Amino acid sequence: MTQLPLRAQLASVLGRTAATLSRVTGRGDGSVIGGRVGLVLEPDLLKQLARDRKLALVSATNGKTTTTRLITSALTELGEVATNAFGANMPAGHVSALSANKAAPYGVLEVDEKYLPEVLDTTGASVVCLMNLSRDQMDRAAEIWLLAQKWRRALSGKPTHVIANCDDPLVTWGASTAAKVTWVAGGQRWKEDSWSCPECGGPLDRKGVDWACRECTFHRPEPHWVLDDDAVIDPRGDRWVLDLQLPGLANRSNGAMALAVAEAFGLHVQSALPRLREVTSVAGRYTTVQRDGRAARLLLSKNPAGWLEAFDVSDSSLPIILSVNAQGPDGRDTSWLWDVDYRILRGRPVYVTGERRLDLALRLDVADVPFQLCESFTEAFNAIPPGRLDVIANYTAFQQIRSEFGRAV
């Protein structure tokens, strides 16, 4: 790589120092503060750190941290990869990630949906992976149709190779201005945000996996990659069993997207797939933690689409703890709880905690789901008899629970 200018070198060093101090003093993992310090000293630092690297940007409402991890694991077959492994997905986090591994020829960066246009423009990334769009943090991100529109504008006229989920109409619309698109049929279980055509506003007709606008020409593209139950079919028609260690249909979809990105980097499925199978947990997601004779599996869910996927992974025979906060990273508005169908929890022992436990309790009561209200996660955990249980929590609640168990990875 080309050596950084002196000012950028100094900004990078001081940023890494700030990150180290943050970790040593227990204030955080340093993935944000280091980048902030670097950007104050050199506002152009992200662009300079991205120069001469082949970068992939990964954006979606759900699954971007996991897919970033899967892509990173695959690309290590080619060489060193710089990545924001713990989800610091705004420019400060990207600076920290690239600064921490300046020699890596490759980079895989998870990017907040709202920041994708800015980060793409700054880094000139050659590959962008777009997976899904659904309601999330409405008080911050606004309508998802507006996000898709920003994606369209950002990709128009750029030579970027986009890997996009053609089963999601909003993602398809957002990606369709790109110079080159590889379409992946990754599935879309949550459809409540995409019944209207983003092109003309008309109704979308759905028949099986296919969809098309009733009033204009907008329709589902023919996929190059197809997720077929537990396998993925590549553009040559070869079928590869995914056999991932991460559970659920959503993660198989993430795996299919990761394989398509890996091939865009010149890595064949045969070489990439074993690397995907090495990933067992992602920033604590899907980890099982043990204490006092209880084994709790931790599942993250931040929005209605995410809860649907979490229920798919959860074991219906086990007790379950649900924890919801409404801090800044979660979004202050909890009205989305009413879009989740909690009736699937009937018949299970359900324990409710978190800062907004009363909001969740009311929603469960309306859904006729019996539950036990608990003041804290510890109270809920101790109320469950020894054995296995599942935990579903939104972002800050999930991080608080991880901290109780020493932030298991």
Image (cartoon, rainbow, N blue to C red):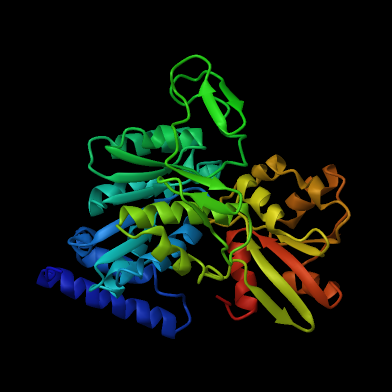
Q: Quadrant of residue 40?
A: bottom left
Left or right side of 390 for 260: left
| One can see residue 143 in this view | no
As drawn, 350 above or below 85: above
Q: Quadrant of residue 94?
A: bottom left
Quadrant containing the C terminus is bottom right
Instruction: Identify the residue shown where x is 79% and y is 69%.
Output: 380
As drawn, 179 above or below 96: above
Left or right side of 267 for 105: left
| One can see residue 350 in this view | yes
Quadrant containing the N terminus is bottom left
As drawn, 349 above or below 336: below
Left or right side of 148 for 339: right
Instruction: Identify the residue shown where x is 39% and y is 49%.
Output: 129
Left or right side of 288 for 175: left
Instruction: Identify the residue shown where x is 58% and y is 77%.
Output: 408
Instruction: Identify the residue shown where x is 77% and y is 47%.
Output: 342
In the image, 258 versus 2, the foreground residue is 258
**How many dots with numbers?**
0
Q: Position of residue 82 (x, y in %)?
A: 32, 68
Q: Position of residue 190 (x, y in %)?
A: 62, 40
Q: Position of residue 368 (x, y in %)?
A: 87, 45
In the image, 260 versus 84, the foreground residue is 260
Name the residue at the top extreme: 215
Q: Position of residue 260 (x, y in %)?
A: 40, 51
